Amino acid sequence: MKKTLLILTLGALPALALAAGSHGAGHGMEGPQTMQGHDMAGMHEDTHASMAGKPGDPSRVSRTIDITMDDSMRFAPDTIQVKKGETVRFTLQNAGKMSHEMVLGTPDELKEHAEMMRKMPMMQHAEPNMVRLAPGQRGSIVWQFDKPGTVDFACLVPGHMEAGMMGKVLVE
């Protein structure tokens, strides 16, 4: 009987994992969480429909831009020019000895997310507009810039943005 119950339980695990979803409201948390009246699941959806653009189709990348992050709390380059409608792959290298990340967004989105990071520093990211990298690690973001203007990016590890780890994408 115990063996049958074990087999049934193990057989149900893949279905339960699939039903739970692949990214727990986008931040490594279980289900929709709230923080000071913010619906985290709703925030996840807002990130995808940001004023900063939208996730890009990797098959439509027109250009790759290499960015280095390091412990001087800077991105290199920190100012990038793109054309409206362009889909860009940002290839990031963490050349530092501590974790860094790149998050694309409007100034308000970045400030709100930075506040969440201060309150929940162990929060894990799983959004298309951000990547967090351990020392020496490489990663990428594919993003389509569909509106003219300025899109900001920053490292939202607590204290990093405040130390000047920010940049801008100028969309012409």
Image: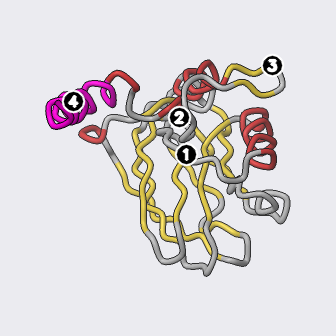
Amino acid under disc 4? Leu
- What residue does disc 4 label? 5
Amino acid under disc 2? Gly
Direction from residue 172 to residue 118 in the image, left or right: right
Query: Is residue 15 within the magenta segment?
Result: yes
Please name whichever residue, 29 or 5, is drawn nearer the observer in this view of the structure.
Answer: 5
Q: CA distance from mark 3 to mark 2?
A: 17 Å
Q: CA distance from mark 4 to mark 1?
A: 36 Å
Q: How is the image coloured?
A: secondary structure
Query: For the C terminus, which image quadrant?
Result: top right
Q: CA distance from mark 2 to mark 1?
A: 6 Å
Front: mark 4 or 2: 4
Q: Nearer the N terminus, badge 4 or badge 1?
A: 4
Residues drawn in magenta: 1-18
Q: Which mark is residue 26?
A: 2
| Residue 54 picture location, percent across and down | 49, 29
Front: mark 3 or 4: 4
- What residue does disc 1 label? 125
For the residues labelled 2 and 1, say whether their Cβ atoms are less than 8 Å apart: yes
Magenta stretch: helix, strand or loop mostly: helix
Q: Is residue 156 above or below residue 55?
A: below
Direction from residue 37 to residue 18 in the image, left or right: left
| Residue 108 picture location, percent across and down | 78, 33
Density class for disc 2 (Cα within 10 Å; few <14, some 14-19, many ≥20) is many
Q: Nearer the N terminus, badge 3 or badge 1?
A: 3
Q: CA distance from mark 3 to mark 1?
A: 20 Å
Mark 2 residue element = helix
Mark 1 residue element = loop
Q: CA distance from mark 3 to mark 4?
A: 42 Å
Q: Which mark is residue 37?
A: 3
Direction from residue 54 to residue 118 in the image, left or right: right
Query: Is residue 143 within the magenta segment?
Result: no
